[in-house]
């Protein structure tokens, strides 16, 4: 049973660039949530996708956008990267509502220089 | 505005003894609480949860206690094992689909 997978594992970008991170949910799951985890902090909710639409959003600027595909996989896009965007980006999947019990992938470590 | 707080950044416990991890919250609208465990280079792993209609939930060596009047929950691990060494996150949800996480407590279980 494949769990949540994310790609790439690590990424280094320059300020002002754009980045796309990818996530495949656990088999059978239909909902994908994205979180940002800065060093020494807990994960912070970015947004959640269900039925290819953004269902809920956290306190992140419009530079953060996403997409969900018909096979439930998802992308997180960040434009105009800032140094402060350096973090571990976690994808979590779940089934149905409420989506309390979320299963996390290993994350993508983004470094902005 | 930190709605979920884990005030102890680290905890060290001897193997076989009880580990108690604490979490406080400020939002009275939270109605579901979860604990996640995180090893280095891995994503958080769901451990145990509790609904606000209960005050205790047990799963093997792990028990979560909820005190709604004090807005406090705790995770008890008995007996603690070296493999339990990890960062533990408390998370809460309040009728929405997002989880609010604390900053984590690093548990070290030594022989």
Image (cartoon, coloured by chain):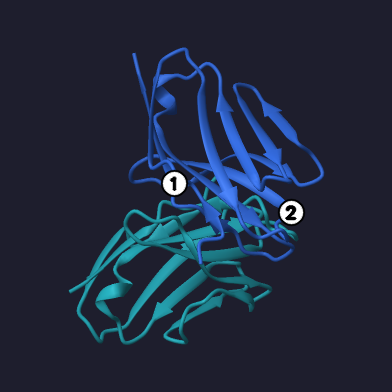
Chain colours: A cyan, B blue
The answer to whether B22 is drawn above or below residue B100 in the figure is: above
Question: What residue is at 74 percent from the left and 59 percent from the top?
Answer: A98
What residue did someone put label 2 on? B31
Residue extending farthest to the right is B53
Total numbered badges shown on the rendered structure = 2
Q: Residue furthest front?
A: B70
Secondary structure at numbered mark 1 = loop
Q: Residue at x 38, y 75 (%)?
A: A20
Q: Chain of mark 2?
A: B
Rendered location of residue A106, percent (x, y): 41, 51
Residue at 71% across, 58% down:
B28
Q: CA distance from mark 1 to mark 2?
A: 20 Å
Image height check: is A68 above or below A40?
below
Q: Which quadrant: the C terminus of chain B? A: top left
Looking at the image, which is closer to me, A29 or B3?
B3
Label located before the other in sequence (1 or 2):
2
Position in image of residue B84 (x %, y %)? 44, 27
Q: Read off the chain for label 1.
A: B
- Tag on residue A97? none
Do tags 1 and 2 sit on the same chain? yes
Q: Answer with left or right where residue A67 lies relative to residue A88.
A: right
Number of the label disc, if any, that sits on residue B104:
1
Q: Secondary structure at mark 2?
A: loop
- Where residue A38 appears, as percent x and y from the top left, is 35, 61
- Give the residue drawn at x 70%, y 40%: B67
Instruction: Name which quarter of the figure residue A47 lies in.
Output: bottom right
- Mark 1 is surrounded, within 10 Å at the Cα level, by few (under 14), some (14 to 19) or many (20 or more) other residues, namely many
Task: Judge the density around disc 2: few (<14), some (14-19), many (≥20) Cα neighbours within 10 Å.
Answer: some
Residue B15, position as x, y percentages in the image: 41, 15
Residue A88 position by quadrant: bottom left
Relative to B39, is B77 on the left or the right? Answer: right
């Amino acid at each position: 049973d494949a769990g949540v997978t994310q790609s790439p594992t690590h990424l280094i970008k320059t300020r002002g660039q754009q980045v796309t991170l990818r996530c495949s949910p656990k088999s059978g799951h239909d909902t994908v949530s994205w979180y940002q985890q800065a060093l020494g902090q807990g994960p912070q909710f970015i947004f959640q996708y269900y039925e290819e639409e953004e269902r809920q959003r956290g306190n992140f600027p419009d530079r953060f956008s996403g997409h969900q595909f018909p096979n439930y996989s998802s992308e997180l896009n960040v434009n105009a990267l800032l140094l402060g965007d350096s973090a571990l980006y976690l994808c979590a999947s779940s089934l149905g509502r409420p989506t309390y019990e979320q299963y996390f992938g290993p994350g993508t470590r983004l470094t902005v220089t | 505005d930190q709605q979920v707080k884990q005030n102890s950044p680290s905890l060290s416990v001897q193997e076989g003894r009880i580990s108690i991890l604490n979490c406080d919250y400020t939002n009275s609208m939270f109605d579901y609480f979860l604990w996640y465990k995180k090893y280095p280079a891995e994503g958080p792993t769901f451990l145990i949860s509790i609904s606000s209609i209960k005050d205790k939930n047990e799963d093997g060596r792990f028990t979560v206690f909820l005190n709604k009047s004090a807005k406090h929950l705790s995770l008890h691990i008995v007996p603690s094992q070296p493999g339990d060494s990890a960062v533990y996150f408390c998370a809460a949800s309040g009728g929405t689909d997002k989880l609010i996480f604390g900053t984590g407590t690093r548990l070290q279980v030594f022989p």
